[in-house]
Amino acid sequence: MLDMDFPPESNTELQIITRLFLLGKTMEKLSDPNSNEGLFNSESNILFALDLSPDQQMFPGQLMQITMLTSGAMTAALNRLIKRGLIERSIDEFDKRKAQIRLTEEGKEQSIEILRSRRLIAGQFLNELDEIEKVRLIKMLRKL
């Protein structure tokens, strides 16, 4: 899929960055625009983060760290998700200055559907790797 020959003298870092870039572009092309139900990737990632949290709620700052969004991008994404009824914002009972973001039932269903779609896409890329290679890849990518 991303098999391209580099000259033997080419820089290892250049090869890695080029392959990562091509992989990202290829994954974007394979993503069905309707599979995310009109959500931006950042919005999907917020739903995933909430879905994976034990009580399906987090503070915006926590979501910013996990999704690596800026404050402005987070606010815009949260507002769009609230408008669609996928999340709700509530005032923290212990600190009235803070708001908690909670996944709605519709948001949970949406998260499951998008995740199902992404797993199909990921399978197209990862089927060449065995389980040990997949674990190694995860560890290496975490270092980046």
Image (spheres, rainbow, N blue to C red):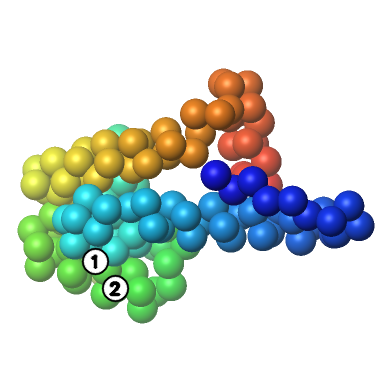
**On the image, which quarter does residue 137 sit in?**
top right
User: Mark 1: few, some, or many residues within 10 Å (few <14, many ≥20)?
Assistant: many
The kind of secondary structure element at disc 1 is: helix
**Residue 2 appearing in the image:** yes
- At x 37% / y 51%, what residue is drawn? 30
The residue nearer to you, when weighing 30 against 99, is 30
Q: In this view, does 41 lie to the left or right of 122?
A: left
The residue shown at (27%, 68%) is: 77
Residue 71 location (% of width, % of height): 39, 74
Query: For residue 78, which numbered disc appears in the image?
Result: 1
Of 64 and 132, the residue lying toward us:
132
Question: 127 or 43, which is in the foreground?
Answer: 127
Q: How crowded is mark 2: few (under 14 residues within 10 Å), some or many (20 or more)?
A: some
6 lies left or right of 4: right
Residue type at mark 2: give it: Thr
Viewport quadrant of the N terminus: top right
Residue for point 68% across, 59% down = 17
Q: Is any atom of residue 100 visible in this view?
A: no
Q: Which mark is residue 75?
A: 2
The residues tagged by marks 2 and 1 sit, at their Cα atoms, a distance apart of 5 Å
Where residue 129 appears, as percent x and y from the top left, is 58, 27
Indicate the position of residue 56 as horizontal and vertical percent values. 24, 42
User: Image height check: is 71 above or below 138?
Assistant: below
In percent of width and height, residue 25 lies at 48, 60
Mark 2 in CB contact with mark 1 (< 8 angstroms): yes
